[in-house]
Image (cartoon, helix red, strand yellow):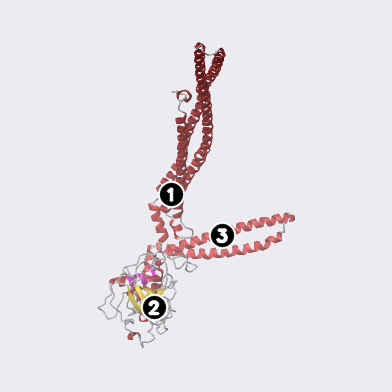
Amino acid sequence: MSCRWGTELWDQFDNLEKHTHWGIEFVERYTKFVKERSEIEISYAKQIRNLSKKYQPKKNSREEDEYKYTSCRAFLMTLNELNDYAGQHEVIAENLTTHIICELTRYIQELKAERKSHFHDGRRAQQHIENSWKQLESSKRRFERDCKEADRAQQYFDKIDADINVTKADVEKARQQAQLKHQVAEDSKNEYLTYLQKFNKEQNEHYYNLIPHIFQKIQEMEEKRIEKVGESMKTYAEVNRKVLPIVSKCLDGMTNAAASIEPTMVSSLVVESFKSGFEPPGDVEVEDYSLSMRRTVSESSYLNSRGEGKPSRSNSRGKLWPFKRNKPGPTSPRQPPPPPPTSPSPGAVPNGPQSPQQPKEPLSHRLNEFMTSKHKMQCLRSLTRGGSGPEDCSHLPPEQRRKKLQAKINDINKELQKEVDQRDALTKMKDVYVKNPHMGDPNSVDPRLEEIGQDIDKLELESRKYEAWLLEVETRLAEKSDPHRRQSGLYESNATTPVNNNCAPVNRESPDGSYTEDHSTEHHLKSRSTDFDDDFDDEDPLPTIGTCKSLYPFEGQNEGTISMAEGELLYVIEEDKGDGWTRVRRNEDEEGYVPTSYIKVFFDTNAKGAMTYI
């Protein structure tokens, strides 16, 4: 259906003006909508990128080690795909701004200028036809007035001519006046007819040529505006459709990442990461208390190396957390605390330590003694131990030690290969200098070659050293894999004391230097127990169970103790277990044991305290 505004709407100039103004406002509103959508896309993409960045693994942190597991790697792949997904929303925002917002903003300015020009021409045409109409009306009124005056002049002449009393001169004068009025009326008539003919012509031109032409341009402008809006809406959809393939690839990448998770491989990695290479402990032999007052242990028992009648710190503390320990902490000293300066002896202090009489041990403490004193429990304290330790990694279990040594050898070989490549390159450079002296002095390369040669010798020496340690570990693992050797080795280890334990000896002196005791077998087992306790402190600090105020100054010079000044306030994290020592904390990094008789304790009834579990 075709229609022309110039013929159909010839008399709707004002309504067309209102309609075109509304059309421009609609384009502006649509442009504002697209602009807000673009801002939403940018904000959404920014939030997605921040979310992806927040959960990315941090460099040189424990999270990097976690990404050896397939589930963690899948999560990392999902984060990367999510980052690409956010990039597509940025592409949408950029394309909306470039192809729609900028284009419509420029087009609106052009549309306003074109509309203003068309309606200016229409108003000018309307003004011209109105002026013509005014001229016609003016000539018409003048013609009417002149005709009335001519008629009155004629009537006056007829009246004078019929009166016999009027002179002939008056009659002639009235006749001339009537003729003059008739001539003026005739001229007015001719002028009116001229204006009328002119107005009709201009009116015909106005309504059949000028107005249709102007309205047709306005119609074309409006149709172009509507078409432009339609193209913008189509572009809006295309901008979103173009990113769908890449978004689909991102989603496919997330799906593939989820499909790459292999629970069995994760289980294998857990075994590889934490396998110690030790064998489980044997059965505990019966201890017959009816034979004598002193405790007698079977020769095949794994506890035969403990000292007789010696109270153990493990009985009172009962630390049994063999799997989740990371940060080393202080251990309770293995001897009675010093008496306070104002008391003659520790027994005179009401809050002093108990008598060293051996209490009857419950089953949980017996199991605790077994785990902390058995030399093979070294594997437990090395599960989460960091990189600190002896150079030969002897503090680690055999399997973990083998892996650590192999990794060290691989790193040395990489460095060695770099040095060899650099030496070869410098050698070639020296040959070039020898053949072409103008390019450089061959002797200038010698110092660097000598330095690299020394580095290579050092690295080769290091490699041989670590390979020897690795061979030792692999030999021991091979021996343990033989069931006959393993069984014989088990009985041998139960009957003898291990020689190489790689544990630092415990200081047997009390904090004030007044208590010393040395039993070789007990020293060996207690040192292992101390090391075990040290390496298995909580990853998170123990909760505070109260506060305390120091009554006397104390210099914590021995292992596991902490110094304090008189009147100092400290946090209590583990109460006295009957050995005269209380575990306190000064801040997040400083904690240790102080004599219970040196402090006044204020327990918090709402705190759970430091609890131990088996």
Looking at the image, which residue sits at the far front?
A: 165
Q: Residues within 10 Å of mark 1 (few under 14, many from 20)?
A: many
Q: Which residue is the site of mark 2?
A: 594
How busy is the neighbourhood of tag 3: few (under 14 within 10 Å), some, or many (20 plus)?
some
Is residue 370 covered in magenta?
yes
Residue at mark 1: 78
Q: How many neighbours does mark 2 have within 10 angstroms: few (below 14), some (14-19), or many (20 or more)?
A: many
Q: Residue at x 40, y 85 (%)?
A: 514
Q: Earlier in the sequence, mark 3 or mark 2?
A: 3
- In magenta, the rendered stretch is 368-378
Callouts 1 and 3 close, C-beta under 8 Å: no
Question: Which quarter of the rendered picture does the N terminus lie within?
Answer: top left
Q: Outermost residue, right direction?
A: 438
Asked if 184 appears above or below 61 in the picture, the reply is: above
| 218 vs 348: above or below | above
Residue corresponding to mark 3: 415
Determine if residue 598 is in view.
Answer: yes
